[in-house]
Image (cartoon, helix red, strand yellow):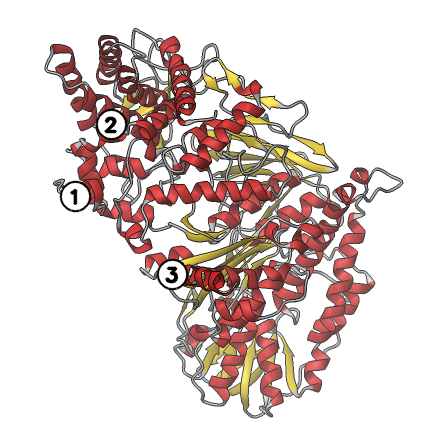
Amino acid sequence: MKKAYFHWELPQEPPLFDDLFNQNLIKEVHPEDWVNPIPAKCYNLVIIGGGTAGLVAAAEAARFGAKVALIERSFLGGNCLNVACIPSKTLARAGRVCSDIRYAASYGVQGNLPLENFEVDFPKVMERIRKIRARIGRHDSAERFRDLGVDVFFGEATFKDEKTIKVNHLILRFKKALVATGSRPATPNIPGLAESGYITNETVFNLNELPKRLMVIGGGPLGCEFAQAFQRLGAKVIVVQNKTLFLPNEERDAAQLLSDSFAKDGMQLRLNTTVSKISLHGKEKLVELSNQNNTEVVAVDEILTGVGRTRNVEGLGLENANIHFNLKNGIMVNDFLQTTNPRVFAAGDVCSDFMYTHAASAAARIVIQNALFRKHKRISKLVIPWCTYTDPEVAHVGVYVRDARAKDLPIKSYTILMHQIDRSIIDGEETGFVKVHVREGTDQILGATIVARHAGEMINEVSLAMVMGLGLADLEKVIHSYPTQAEAIPKAGDAYVKTKLSPRFENAARLWFKLIR
Amino acid sequence: MRNATEQTNFLNELQKKSFQYFLDLYNPNNGLIPDTDENNAPASITGVGFALSSYPVAVEKKLLSREEAVKRTLVTLKFFFESEQSEKLNATGYKGFYYHFLDMKTGCRTWKSELSIIDTGFLLAGVICTAEYFKQKNESEVEIQKLASGILNRVDWRWALDERAALSHGWRPESSFIHYDWEGYSEALLLYCLALGSDNFAVSKKSFEAWSSTYQWENIYDVDFLYAGPFFIHLFSHAWIDFRDIRDKFMHAKKIDYFENTRRAIQVQRAYCIRNPKNFIGYGKNCWGITADAGPDYYKQFRSGDEVVFFGYSARGVPYGPDDGTIAPWACVASLPFDPDSAFDAINHLHQTYPQLRGKYGFKCSFNMSINPVWFLERFYAMDVGIIIMMIENAQSGLVWNLMKKSRILQRGLTRAGFSGGWLEGKSS
């Protein structure tokens, strides 16, 4: 029987889990008895990569009646289902529960046991992750796609020429193709790291025992999410970031609030610090940290790296199909997501800096429109929000203030603190803010940053406004349920409207009311 | 305090007590001023900058004779001009800049501190201020002029860019430049004016643009202002520069000046403390001043079931924090020029409500009523007493501002940064 394993790049890794949930998942996303179909004479669309972009494109194309082939070398569902969004957010949810329990006393909730001393059953936490992954995996199942009319192939795909792809021993001819092979974790070049052993987002979900001391290398979104989740589950976490702030691409205030939240969780933070070398002493990993000229050695039980992504472009025979690419930026595409081979398109992490599931999904829809219906939809026209699922969450859409100012674009931010919102006070979730950036002198929304416990939910309202061309004053008119945390958004609109009241108007109004009383 | 005379008397007395710090703790051999009044505290070059700026005030307020003030100034400037400038680990400075902390006796670098660009800026502002005041044509004051020129002209601002656009935070002989640059609205406004106005090593306007490129113009609590969290940012450069009616490109577009911006920052401080989102004891419309300063040492305490973390010395700020209930009364005093009514209401409130705040050198630098037991900082900081002396004087007579307005370096720096209008009109760049 095929064992369940989750190591994206090295499927020969020994399996760790063989439980019912992983068996169910495998049945859905890479059935062991799957027989590749006999290829059609020619496909309207051949898709390499069964992650989000590939699956969305396959379903869309099949819905329109196109003959579609989908090739996956490992598990359908890609990073999102197997080693990223789904399992990592499930892990974070367990961490959030721990945090809520830890602070339950401040809500007047006391248990028979001191709540500070509650226990985390880590294997159960991991089991829940596998359970949820298996459940959501049903939607990405090979059988479901076969039923949609998609020819699903499992195997390594290689371009033979500009019109042909080989998968295992089979030849697939295409009118159009989509490369959606995604990305994998980048490996930091640290002496001793490989020898000492480390985990990434691809292997972390194999853990069945909580590391007592965990070092997370990298303070970007992935590193921050894992670090906080593990700390809350009971590990002693040290986060090492070689830059001066966490989430360096986000606004400083957002990163600052996150740092404060990490400190409250008890995490050890090492900013502006690099890992110079690692060695293994027994079961301990000794990590040498450098900050300017100061060095220290820290002993940990496990190391998790989260220092960026590498695009999966190798071994695809892209050069045979005249598709230009490089290792850093991936496949080169134009604004219509067309590669240098006009028959071939790309979508998702392999070609985009927006390495998010929802961005890959949106890109796949554009590819279907442009590749199959000869439309000219532009990726640059998309409004793509994103969110780092820490607690508080940090979400953003549109431009950053620094980018606007670099372009000499007059920009003004209307900021509502979460402590101004009744529901946040009620929930004890006052850390954060809603900042809506407008073109100064107008209410045209250029972007927004939200830091709040549910920022990922809240940012969508601002995205909607931007897509529909609504201004900040329009958001002020939208009646929101009370009490909700999303009220911060119309309050930002209200702040804008108040600034439109000129002193002259105020004086005139004062005079008018004096006259009529 | 019922009337203007009582207020003036109170402020004069506060100014006098604060100045006593410099009288008591000045080292007559080298002019150095300790960072704090604790035993064995090192000298802080920022403290020296504030002391130098306070000597003219003390002469005018008859707290110090002109002769004594000249003597102190000469000793100080001689030390800074003649002390070792090299890459050696224990030098006093390098490339015209100085180490943040110096040994009080030897004047050598101590605490492995960084060659601090910003603290050198505050020191140089003090040098300029004192040189603009002691200008009589006698031997001592001519010597002050020469020494001041020597100190100011050798500062290699371009080196401090480390081949980037913005000024670096500092440098260490062991590891070269610190990885942080001065970007975004901060106390470095003064620094850039000095660097742009330098005779020999002026940085270009691009540096000022790099610094201001991350400005955040925000509407918070219905107040439009150039955001900076820690309140001292809105005060420190203003201790030397009168920003009334002079505007750079950014402020021109916003139709206000940096002075008005600080007044608005006071409004935000007050609005935050009225809201008091973390329910700290004492906060209110007359109890504000959340800024960088010492506070209760780092630890956690539970209060009414809520966890409160105390941060020790931290750059506290509003509205995003960090905030642990620590208030710095000097910040209210330093607000006098901008919003006299709000500032004096706060001063009066703090003085009347918390008699424990009254210390040897005036208001204690910070306190926290939300910790058990309540906490008052028992040491005084040179820069905190210094800014009290200077800002009371600026509010009363504008003495420091008026002296600085005469500085060619500052005029040129402001003009090159794009400032115009107000008192800068007619000044050549």
Q: Which residue is mark 3?
A: A504
Q: Secondary structure at mark 1?
A: loop
Q: Is residue B173 visible?
A: no
Q: CA distance from mark 2 to mark 3?
A: 55 Å
What residue is at 39 percent from the left and 77 percent from the top? A340
Residue B409 in percent (x, y) is at 18, 33
Q: Label 2: chain?
A: B
Residue B210, image x, y percentages = 31, 48
Q: Chain of mark 1?
A: B
Q: Kindly identify which numbered label has been placed on residue B425.
A: 1
Q: Is residue A168 left or right of residue A437?
A: right
Residue that carries the numbered disc 2 in the rendered image: B95
- B127 relative to B276 in the view: left or right: left
Residue A223's disc number: none
Chain bearing mark 3: A
Disc 1 residue type (three-letter): Glu
Quarter of the view holding residue B390:
top left
A351 left or right, relative to A89? left
The correct choice, above or below, for B371 with respect to A160 in the image is above
Q: Nearer the viewer, residue A125 or A491?
A: A491
Looking at the rendered structure, the secondary structure element under dot 2 is loop
Looking at the picture, which amino acid does disc 3 mark?
Answer: Arg
Residue B120 in view here: yes
Q: Secondary structure at mark 3?
A: helix
Residue nearest the viewer, comparing A278 with A255:
A255
Q: Nearer the viewer, residue A282 or A247?
A: A247
